[in-house]
Image (spheres, rainbow, N blue to C red):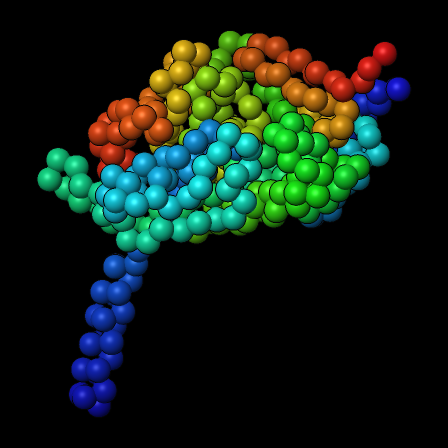
């Protein structure tokens, strides 16, 4: 019996050890074309030296959830390890005709639209698995959209830590204050993922949000 | 082309199971009507509405435009007022108004803190 208890104790300690080492999942969420994949690439380039997603000016370029495992970020002597989850943009409508404007042929546009709808569904399904989320918003666009409100409302209801990356601040029309005014409960970091502007502040804020 | 607005009282969907609630709203929207729902859905139901919409997108049904208006919208920032409504949010609420329209008719719902504009695709 003593041997049994010894094994039982050892097993529970090992289980606890592995549970504690469960990889943290950091999700990038937001509407299409906000720069989620550009930010994912920037983080990967900064810490792994390689990119993880393809980016383009055409909406819904990312149509499936992409995971890059074991990224270790260091800031001010601290380190943070996580699996980065790049998700398709969440939208309430998808019209294949919108893709025709980008000189796509009809069949390709229809296929892209079909994949995009599945991408939105997958992104929503993955919400439950996230340990923390960076909501990526295009700071040149009015932030008062229902998709933004729905995403952030859902994360709040699930008690998932959130920070907002106000992306594309290198563009003239960028207005970080509009995003701060719309979502005053959440930390907002203005940045340009494409140009790598203000990434240090982004990583510092990421530490604060994840360690909550 | 006529534009039809259908008012849905909160009581009419409140007793339904979440799936039936979402289906009921989507059924109206798919008949090219704009739903004016008294109150708002829970955040989880909003994402479910988006999910169900995406499952049903076809060449004819391109999705929805969605917008929720809160009663105190005139004087308070959106999330500041939401902070005080957390419980109501989690439970769904009869306060406010939710607009759900078919994307082939509603091009965009522009929301600023104190006004809503419905931009339609209707010509002529």
Q: Measuring 22% from the left and 90% from the top, which residue is drawn there? A: A1
For the C terminus of chain A, give its image quadrant. Answer: top left
The structure residue drawn at horizontal position 17% and vertical position 37%, both measured from the top left corner, is: A75
In terms of depth relative to the viewer, which is nearer, A194 or A74?
Answer: A194
View extreme (left): residue: A77
Q: Please, is residue A50 above or below residue A183 in the view? A: below
Query: Does residue B41 appear anywhere in the picture?
Result: no
Pinpoint residue A172: horizontal percent, then vertical percent.
41, 11
Whether residue B58 appears in this view of the structure is yes
Residue A66's spot in the image, x, y percent?
44, 49
Task: Tell which of B44 and B15 is nearer to you.
Answer: B44
Q: Is residue B1 above or below residue B18?
A: above
Percent x, y of residue A98:
66, 30
Residue A10 lies left or right of residue B113; in this view the side is left
Residue depicted at 64% across the width and 14% down the height: B116
Q: Residue at x 47, y 29 (%)?
A: A34
């Amino acid at each position: 019996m003593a041997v049994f208890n010894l094994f039982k104790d050892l097993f529970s300690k090992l289980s606890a050890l592995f549970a504690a080492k469960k990889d943290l999942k950091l999700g990038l969420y937001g509407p299409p074309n906000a720069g989620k994949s550009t930010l994912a690439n920037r983080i990967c380039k900064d810490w792994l030296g390689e990119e993880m997603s393809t980016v383009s000016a055409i909406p819904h370029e990312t149509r499936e959830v992409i995971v890059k495992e074991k990224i270790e970020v260091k800031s001010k002597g601290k380190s943070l390890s996580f699996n980065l989850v790049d998700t398709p943009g969440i939208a309430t409508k998808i019209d294949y005709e919108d893709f025709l404007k980008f000189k796509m042929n009809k069949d390709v546009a229809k296929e892209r639209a079909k994949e995009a709808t599945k991408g939105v569904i997958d992104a929503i399904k993955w919400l439950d698995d996230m340990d923390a989320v960076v909501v990526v918003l295009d700071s040149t666009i009015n932030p008062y959209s229902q998709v933004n409100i729905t995403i952030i409302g859902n994360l709040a209801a699930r008690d998932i830590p959130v920070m907002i990356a106000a992306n594309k601040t290198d563009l003239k029309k960028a207005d970080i204050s509009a995003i701060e005014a719309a979502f005053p409960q959440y930390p907002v970091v203005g940045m340009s993922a494409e140009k790598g502007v203000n990434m240090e502040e982004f990583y510092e804020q990421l530490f604060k949000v994840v360690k909550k | 082309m006529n534009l039809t607005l259908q008012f849905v009282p909160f009581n009419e969907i409140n007793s339904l199971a979440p799936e039936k609630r979402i289906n009921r709203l989507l059924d109206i929207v798919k008949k090219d009507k704009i739903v004016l729902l008294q109150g708002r859905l829970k955040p989880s139901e909003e994402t479910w509405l988006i999910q169900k919409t995406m499952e049903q997108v076809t060449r004819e049904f391109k999705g929805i435009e969605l917008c929720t208006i809160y009663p105190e919208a005139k004087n308070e920032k959106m999330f500041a007022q939401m902070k005080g409504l957390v419980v109501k949010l989690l439970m769904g609420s009869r306060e406010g108004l939710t607009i759900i329209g078919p994307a082939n008719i509603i091009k965009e719902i522009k929301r600023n803190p104190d006004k809503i504009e419905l931009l339609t695709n209707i010509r002529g």
